[in-house]
Image (tube, rainbow, N blue to C red):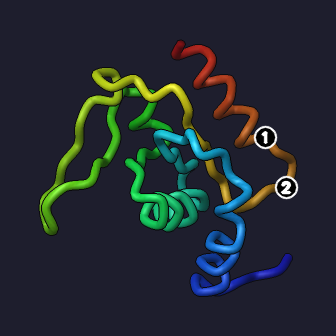
């Protein structure tokens, strides 16, 4: 297994941003390993962020005044294009599970 620093992760994200679709409206991180990568990407793209459970419950963390904790229901603005992120892969079972949960939630 190869390990990278947070700085390496951030540089990989920056280098890959141009490969992403431009219509992403929400970044969803798969706990725990995907949350850091999702957070960094959401910061670079200035997009709302959610963990998988929060997304399924209709919550996302949004931008707001510095120091404020703001969460708004995803349902109100119903993002059509989300990017689900996990930063490690062995068997792909976590991503498969996430896809099933999202599909079941409608």
The residue carrying mark 1 is: 93
The circle on residue 90 is 2
Left or right, residue 13 beside residue 45: right
The residue lying at 42 percent from left, 45 percent from top is: 50
Quote the CA–CA distance across marks 1 and 2.
8 Å
Q: Is residue 56 above or below residue 54?
A: above
* 1 and 2 marks in contact (CB < 8 Å): yes
Task: Find numbered disc 1 in the image and state the secondary structure of the residue it sits on.
Answer: helix
Q: Is residue 7 above or below residue 28?
A: below
The residue lying at 46 percent from left, 62 percent from top is: 39
The residue lying at 59 percent from left, 77 percent from top is: 10
Left or right, residue 55 beside residue 16: left
Q: Quick one: 22 or 39, which is closer to the camera? A: 22
Q: Residues within 10 Å of mark 2 (few under 14, many from 20)?
A: few
Image quarter (top left, top right, bottom left or bottom right) of the N terminus: bottom right
Q: Quick one: 24 or 85, which is closer to the camera? A: 24
Left or right, residue 68 beside residue 94: left
Q: Residues within 10 Å of mark 1 (few under 14, many from 20)?
A: few
């Amino acid at each position: 297994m190869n390990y990278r620093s947070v700085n390496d992760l951030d540089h990989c994200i920056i280098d890959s941003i141009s490969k992403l679709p431009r219509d992403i409206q929400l970044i969803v991180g798969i706990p725990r390993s995907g949350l850091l990568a999702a957070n960094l990407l959401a910061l670079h793209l200035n997009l709302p962020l959610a963990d998988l459970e929060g997304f399924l419950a209709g919550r996302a963390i949004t931008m707001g005044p510095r120091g404020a904790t703001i969460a708004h229901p995803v349902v109100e603005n119903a993002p059509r294009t989300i990017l689900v992120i996990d930063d490690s892969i062995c068997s792909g079972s976590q991503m498969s599970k996430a896809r099933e949960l999202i599909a079941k939630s409608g």
